[in-house]
Amino acid sequence: MLTNKIIAYITSFVSVIFIPIVPVSTFILGLCVKVTFGLLLIPISIIWSCFYLPLLGLSFVWEKYKILRPIASIIGIPIAIVAYIFCGLMPSMGETSSKMEKIFITQVFPYNWTLLQHLKKTAYPITSGNYRKLLEIMYQQKANNKLMTAYIDKELLNR
């Protein structure tokens, strides 16, 4: 839970810094996506997968091998923070649910593996001890953001 708390504090601080930049970057990148007829979304998706796959892999390592948790946390925290900044600066192009999903994925590290198993509807999240912590993070995120609340209620809790 310490890893997740560190990410939460740093992303809160970073959010305050990027508040004036986000509308400008979203507008400019949104225009670029429109001008390129959506082709700019391909490199944006590739860059996102360069963040998501390491986060998922490190989450798997964090859950399966307790002795490697400090290493996975040290590597994963900067990746999660940079991914959070990337998601915040990218346009949603009318799909706020997709943007909220990406932001949520960055916020739940190191419980990404548990989240994936929850989305797959496997029994793994309940058997792992981390499901309760994932639910706590979900409810914390719901308290802070109306868009995140809508995403969590619709996509995660009503499955």
Image (tube, rainbow, N blue to C red):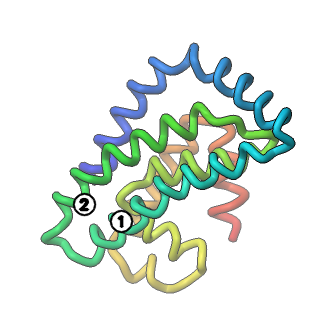
The residue at the far left in this view is: 67
Q: What residue appears at the point 55 percent right and 18 percent down from the top-left corner?
A: 19
Identify residue for label 2: 72
Crowd rating for badge 2 (residues with CA inside 10 Å; few <14, some 14–19, many 20+): many
Q: What residue appears at the point 21 percent right and 76 percent down from the top-left corner?
A: 65
**Residues tagged 2 and 1 counted as in contact (Cβ below 8 A):** yes
The residue at the far bottom in this view is: 123
Percent of width and height locating residue 134: 44, 61
What is the secondary structure assignment of the residue under circle 1? Answer: helix
Per the rendering, the mark at residue 45 is none
Image quarter where the N terminus lies is bottom left
Percent of width and height locating residue 2: 24, 49
Crowd rating for badge 1 (residues with CA inside 10 Å; few <14, some 14–19, many 20+): many
Q: Whole-Å distance between the Cαs marked 2 and 1?
A: 7 Å
- The amino acid sitting under disc 2 is Ala
* 81 left or right, relative to 68: right
- First-in-chain label (2 vs 1): 1
Identify residue for label 1: 59
- The amino acid sitting under disc 1 is Ser
* 27 left or right, relative to 69: right
Q: Is residue 16 above or below residue 65?
A: above
**Toward the viewer: 46 or 133?**
46
Q: What residue appears at the point 33 percent right and 64 percent down from the top-left corner?
A: 58
